[in-house]
Image (spheres, rainbow, N blue to C red):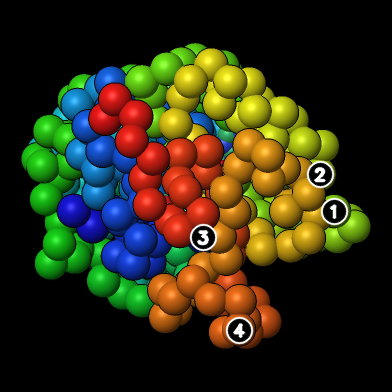
Amino acid sequence: MTPFLKWAGGKRWLVANHGQWLRRSVDRYLEPFLGSGAVFFYLKPQRAILSDLNEELIATYQALRTQPHEVWRHLRAHHRKHNKEYFYHVRQQNLRTSASKAARFIYLNRTCFNGLYRVNLQGIFNVPKGTKDNVILNTDDFSLVSERLQPATLVSQDFLHTIKKAKEGDFLYVDPPYTVRHNKNNFIKYNERIFSWDDQKRLAEGLLLAARRGASVFVSNADHPCIHELYHASVWQRFTVNRFSGLASSSKHRKGTTELVISNYLTKRGKQEDQRY
Ligand SMILES: C[S@@+](CC[C@H](N)C(=O)[O-])C[C@H]1O[C@@H](n2cnc3c(N)ncnc32)[C@H](O)[C@@H]1O
């Protein structure tokens, strides 16, 4: 199922090219950097903890889970009224009900510049209108989204709270913002908070403990020497993947097109180790 949001760093390409690397049939699925949830919607787990620091994002999922028809009704109203002036009117609105807030979030996501999410210091969304005007998509099925979200616990919190819950039998899919050392945090900014190099270190430490508790872990991250160093080869298998062709090949590196995937259950050849799954 295609995610209903367009999200910076979204992983539609990963599931399209490397779905076989992801753990299926696990006790529980945990995703601490949910974004548009491309991997969650692909795997359709029966039990899940989904979280993200972005409160508006998590509130949107919560509203879709309980009131998909209400959200759809509001979104259709945006569709009918959409134009440039209306976009800026909605952008500065502060709505009251959870369904109208969710529809506003989806409307702005679909019509703003590149589907970016950025807020000013007051926490108000400030991305300008983009070039896309499709408020309703052919792939929209909010009843199905609601159905898929039923078995999930949805929380807005820092990643470490979710990672600390991972234990044997769990599958942890981890897709943080791609910050690297020495970039003075200007690489990518998300929400009011910047994902710092200290966060990357905190993340790697938390994942090592989760791996030691027996959780299966799969991480997406920047293909940068400092990230390779954080995930030591004695515990982690690291693969460079090409976003566009999907090919994993060091000879095909093109600047900016490779990413790193890191896991504790894949063999050197990229096969899943036999555990009890
Ligand atoms: C690369 S995106 C995830 C994309 C997702 N995999 C997808 O397919 O759309 C990273 C996410 O991390 C969230 N985030 C940033 N800092 C965080 C933190 N400290 N704890 C939890 N989530 C955080 C952002 O809000 C963003 O949604």
Q: Is mark 1 within 8 Å of ligand 1?
A: no
At a point 82% along the width and 37% down the height, the residue shown is 198
Which residue does the numbered mark 1 point to in the structure image?
181
Which residue does the numbered mark 3 point to in the structure image?
8
Q: Secondary structure at mark 2?
A: helix
Q: Quadrant of ligand 1?
A: top right
Which residue does the numbered mark 4 point to in the structure image?
251
Q: Are marks 4 and 2 in contact (CB under 8 Å)?
A: no
At a point 80% along the width and 54% down the height, the residue shown is 226
Q: Is mark 3 within 8 Å of ligand 1?
A: yes
Q: Are marks 3 and 1 in contact (CB under 8 Å)?
A: no
| Distance from Cα at disc 3 to Cα at disc 1 | 20 Å
The image quadrant that residue 124 belongs to is top right
Q: Residue 275's x, y, as percent?
A: 34, 29
- The amino acid pointed to by label 4 is Ser
Total marks drawn? 4
128 vs 49, nearest the viewer: 49
Q: Of the two numbered discs 3 and 4 on the same chain, state the one appearing first in sequence.
A: 3
Q: Of the two numbered discs 4 and 2 on the same chain, state the one appearing first in sequence.
A: 2
Say if 130 sits above or below 29 in the image: below
At a point 68% along the width and 45% down the height, the residue shown is 233
Q: Are marks 1 and 2 in contact (CB under 8 Å)?
A: yes
92 sits to left or right of 126:
left
Q: Are marks 1 and 4 in contact (CB under 8 Å)?
A: no
| Distance from Cα at disc 4 to Cα at disc 2 | 28 Å
